Amino acid sequence: MMKVINEECPNITRIYNIGKSSQGLKMYAMEISDNPGEHETGEPEFRYTAGLHGNEVLGRELLLLLMQFLCKEYNDENPRVRRLVDGVRIHLVPSLNPDAYELAFEMMGNWALGHWTEEGYDIFENFPDLNSILWGAEDRGWVPRLVSNHHIPLPENYLNGSVSFLDTKAIISWMERTPFVLGANLQGGEKLVAYPFDMQRPPRQNEGSLRETPDDAMFRWLAMSYAHSHLNMIETYRGSCHGDDVTGGQGIVNQASWKPVVGSMNDFSYLHTNCFELSIFLGCDKFPHVSELPQEWENNRESLLAFIEQVHRGIKGVVRDTEGNALPNATISVEGIRHDVKTAAEGDYWRLLNPGEYRVTAKADGYTPQTKLCLVGYDSGATSCSFALAKSNWDRIRSLTSTSLAKVCVTSFESLLHL
């Protein structure tokens, strides 16, 4: 089906492989963009993934239908779809666990088969635990002076550990080489949207275990943008497949307060990359009958589109030096929100923010930081907030200072020898 769509819309689609499973099956992605195959400066990148659990197949089918819909509507000059495709680089991966899907398809009568990988691990919960690294550093007062609050590096025990987790490592590599801004993974077994943190912090004296992200208000908005656009996700009695309304009738829940997970894809995405990631649970039936797909598509179509559009919420810009050269890996900080993002290879960045007034600072090694007041309004589209950083004199001053100190030390030593 992906090949057929690519043939029908060759100018806006590209099929590529993000890696192989442990059994050697390829994890195919469809890119949909007005310029496929290339990151365009100033254009945000978005991802939907499905099939982390091979026996939860509705997400897989919805992403295939979304590809088909975007292709057809773009060719029919649907203005909304044209804006999406021309303004966002969209990546859709329908099957992140193809080995498990093959097993689930053969044994669809068994609810458990196909949930895990061939080696028996859950891909969604198989990412490095960066939460503990950050929270431990916060307890010691090391953040942000010694440990940053973003782009936390992979721990040594993961880098030097087993190489059997090919699926997870392929996903991490994909995350690292693509400047994603927003994404969601489609799962099954419930009907709600869950947002991070997914992990609970070990309780301390006079403190609870629940730790919200610095962007909790933004995550709640993103979750609501999907749940409230869905045809029936916010109906209270559908809040849980087990009879409990865990969402308060809103269709959204903080994962850590509901079903805590250690090493989740969502927490890793937030702490290791710029991407805000959520989990969308599509329903209680993990393997619905084919006759139900048309209605499920109608239930989710508007939500799938509305959520992509949230990638334009907040501020965006480019960080350059005073000569106009792009500055990659510059840090963008928002006053009052203890979570920074970094610029991409072309110096461009995107920072998801709710409407309001923000003091934003751009910093880069060897340059003088610059702060601007950026206003995020209620209209669609991110506010432009770019920076031109001047080279800092501190490196030169430190060099001169160290040279002068060396001369003083030599002179003093010579004087002592003379005495």
Image (cartoon, rainbow, N blue to C red):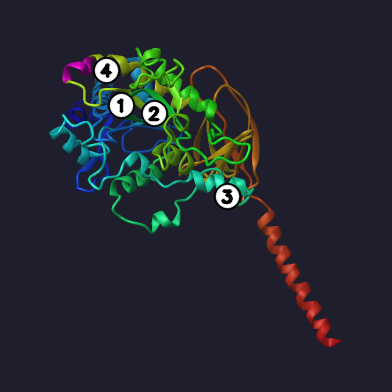
Instruction: Give the spatial CA distance, label 3 vs label 1.
Output: 37 Å
Viewer-nearest residue: 215 or 40 = 215
Horizontal arrangement in the rendering, residue 279 relative to residue 10 (left or right):
right
Q: Please report whichever mark, 3 or 1, sits nearer to the chain's N-terminal start.
A: 3
Residue 330 picture quarter: top right
Residue depicted at 42% across the width and 15% down the height = 228
Residue 295 picture quarter: top left
Of circles 1 and 4, the one toward us is 1
Q: Which residue is mark 3?
A: 147
Residue depicted at 38% across the width and 21% down the height = 83
Region rendered in magenta: 290-294
Instruction: Give the spatial CA distance, label 1 vs label 4.
Output: 17 Å
Residue 349 falls within the magenta-colored stretch: no
Density class for disc 4 (Cα within 10 Å; few <14, some 14-19, many ≥20) is some
Viewer-nearest residue: 368 or 413 = 413
Name the residue type under label 1: Gly
Percent of width and height locating residue 195? 45, 29
Q: Which residue is mark 2?
A: 88
Of circles 2 and 3, the one toward us is 3
Name the residue type under label 2: Val
Q: Which residue is mark 4?
A: 297
Percent of width and height locating residue 15? 24, 36
